[in-house]
């Protein structure tokens, strides 16, 4: 989506069920979610100091959760940037397509869960920042 901005990202509180035996959070397709998810992937065993992401998607929408530990999600629409700190399995950020994103400051042992609106397709990626700015029709 060419017109999306960082202000289109949504903070979502996921329902948390706490029991004496531990917590449960389930993510269901409800009105809170604007898209049907077709893929789930997760990032783990991230070496200290390593960053992830560093790309944008033309069409893919995503919901990002720190199911364990914490990290910062930096979104960038070519004009403005916004940082979301994810540090709870019951908090998520929903991202529209067309935003450059970077995941940084992973705590040791953290796990990043990503719900996606579609299956993996390398053609949907913008992996070069200049290509991303061109996609957003931003003069460089
Ligand atoms: P990449 O998108 O570069 O990782 P990140 O942006 O999270 O740092 O993906 C790393 C590799 O994994 C790359 O070769 C593409 C592949 N991959 C899949 O095959 N399927 C997937 O669902 C994802 C997210 C990545």
Image (cartoon, rainbow, N blue to C red):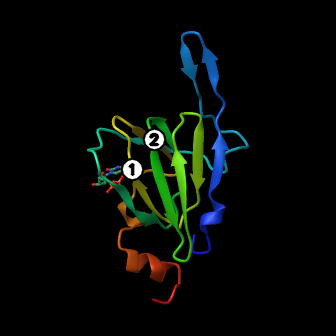
Instruction: Specify whether 41 is left or right of 7.
Output: left
Q: Circle 1 sits in a helix, a strand or a loop, which is it?
A: loop
Q: Dot 1: within a 10 Å radius of its alpha carbon, few (fewer than 14), some, or many (20 or more) residues?
A: some
Q: Quadrant of residue 8?
A: bottom right
Position of the C terminus, as image quadrant, is: bottom left
Residue for point 61% across, 13% down: 19
Q: Which residue is mark 2?
A: 70
Residue for point 44% across, 75% down: 132
Residue 77 against residue 32 in the figure, above or below? below
Position of the N terminus, as image quadrant, is: bottom right
Q: Is residue 63 visible?
A: no
Q: Is residue 97 visible?
A: yes
Q: Which residue is mark 1?
A: 105
Q: Residue furthest top?
A: 20
State how far apart marks 1 and 2 are (Cα). 8 Å
Q: Circle 2 sits in a helix, a strand or a loop, which is it?
A: loop
Of 103 and 61, nearer the camera is 103
């Amino acid at each position: 989506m060419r017109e999306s901005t960082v202000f289109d990202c949504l903070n979502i509180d996921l329902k948390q069920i706490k029991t004496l035996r531990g917590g449960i959070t389930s993510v269901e397709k409800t009105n809170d979610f604007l898209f049907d998810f077709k893929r789930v992937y997760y990032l783990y065993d991230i070496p200290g100091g390593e960053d992830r992401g560093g790309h944008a998607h033309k069409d893919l929408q995503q919901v990002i959760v720190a199911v364990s530990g914490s990290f910062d999600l930096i979104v960038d629409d070519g004009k403005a940037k916004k940082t979301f700190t994810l540090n709870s399995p019951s908090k998520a950020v929903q991202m529209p397509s067309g935003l450059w994103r970077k995941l940084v400051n992973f705590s040791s042992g953290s796990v990043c869960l990503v719900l996606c609106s579609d299956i993996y397709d390398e053609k949907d990626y913008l992996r070069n920042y200049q290509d991303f700015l061109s996609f957003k029709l931003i003069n460089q």
